[in-house]
Image: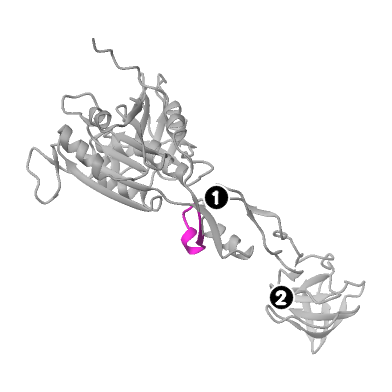
Amino acid sequence: MAHPPLPPIPLEVAQSRLLALVEPLRVEHVDLEGALGRYLAQPLLARRTQPAADVSAMDGYAVASIPADPRWTVIGESAAGHPHTGTIGDGEAVRISTGALLPAGASAVVLQEDIAREGDAIHLEGSAPAPVSRHVRHCGMDFAEGTQVLPAGIAIGPAQIALAMTAGHKHLPVHRRPTVTIIDSGDELARDPEVCPLHQVPASNGLMLAAMMRGLTAETRRIGPVVDTMDALIGAFDAAGDAEVIVTSGGASVGDHDLVRPALEAWGAQLDFWRIAIKPGKPLLVATRRRANGRPQVIVGLPGNPASSMVTAFHFVLPLLRRLLGAAQPMATAITTRLGADVPATGARREFLRAHWDGESVSPVVLQDSGALAAMAASNALIDRPAHTPALAAGEPVSIYQLQNG
């Protein structure tokens, strides 16, 4: 006697179970340019002090002190990359540029615009002298040698690359990027969008999913569309090879032709969970299969409708890839904004409404059908609506996730 399926599980429970299946991949060292978009595998310690010595923060004159009668004689110049080699005494000044080393004996910089100069004689104009040490970037102001400048797990962007180089590093430790195979399945899918009969639709999900993963994988292979037979699906899984992650699109529901789940079981994969309490995306499944090296091969079965596939990839596939890359925070972070239009009450499942966010307010697109691609392309955010919540009016606060669509 067949048992009824277990009730759908909450989003965060499913995400935690998925991420617990894997560990970050092995560590490799890459040059700074190659580190962009990766995640730091170990805390990064500074190999030098920045600034390495006291430098000027402004253009002006370096002086030893500011006397009651602020007048000095200019004895030289300190330019960026060309320091003054002498020592400043009382009543003396050195012309200095931003970033130049402070000469020995100097303790302050007087701004160029506050100075009147005749030949080598300068004096402070006005009655408010600059305080001692103003406009000086002291040695170690940014960081000191041996201190941690970046934590493990941080995303490496342009600023992190600049910091790492300034801290004395040419290479960074990062986790190896995973390999992924995407399998599109369904008799209704046409490979060629220019040759698509009425009973089919172009197989766009695989291309969409690959685009979402860009930068997070070492290789993304696409297989399909695969017809709805056990033999074809098992053959596609065999063809996926030793990829760390296999993502399927379509065939994960309960219809007569939804064969991904039984095909996985026949292939030797073990189902971890199936069906999530979200809309769209309820039929999502996760399974694993032990590879020759002992590490798990994770299979994420996504629904076939485009919006369902995108939403579940956003909440499951992308966090899984970030986990393999060693991200400290693999999950997307929600932000709070206000509604630009009313939204209806929700039912028994948590809903993610496709929406457009203009930076100040967010409004759901009119058509929320999970097969509506034009509405999905017009969206750059997901409005997070918990289950069993009342309708909200325009102007009320709401949580959203930003998408990559634009």
Q: Is residue 240 above or below residue 391?
A: below
Location of residue 358 (image quadrant): top left
Name the residue carrying label 2: 100
Q: SS at mark 1?
A: loop
The 10 Å Cα crowd at callout 1, few under 14, some 14 to 19, many 20 or more, is many
Query: Sequence order check: which comes first, mark 2 or mark 1?
Result: 1
Most foreground residue, 183 or 264? 264
State the extent of the magenta-drawn residues as a range. 28-38
Q: Amino acid at mark 2?
A: Ala
Name the residue carrying label 1: 41
Residue under the image location 9 percent in, 49 percent down: 195
Q: Residue furthest bottom?
A: 119
Please provide percent x and percent y for residue 120. Answer: 81, 88
Most foreground residue, 325 or 96? 325
Q: For the N terminus, give its image quadrant.
A: top left
Relative placement, left or right, of 253 versus 382 is left
31 is within the stretch colored magenta: yes
The 10 Å Cα crowd at callout 2, few under 14, some 14 to 19, many 20 or more, is many
Q: SS at mark 2?
A: loop
Q: Residue furthest front?
A: 292
Location of residue 269 (image quadrant): top left
Res 205 visible: no
Give the CA separation, mark 2 to mark 1.
35 Å
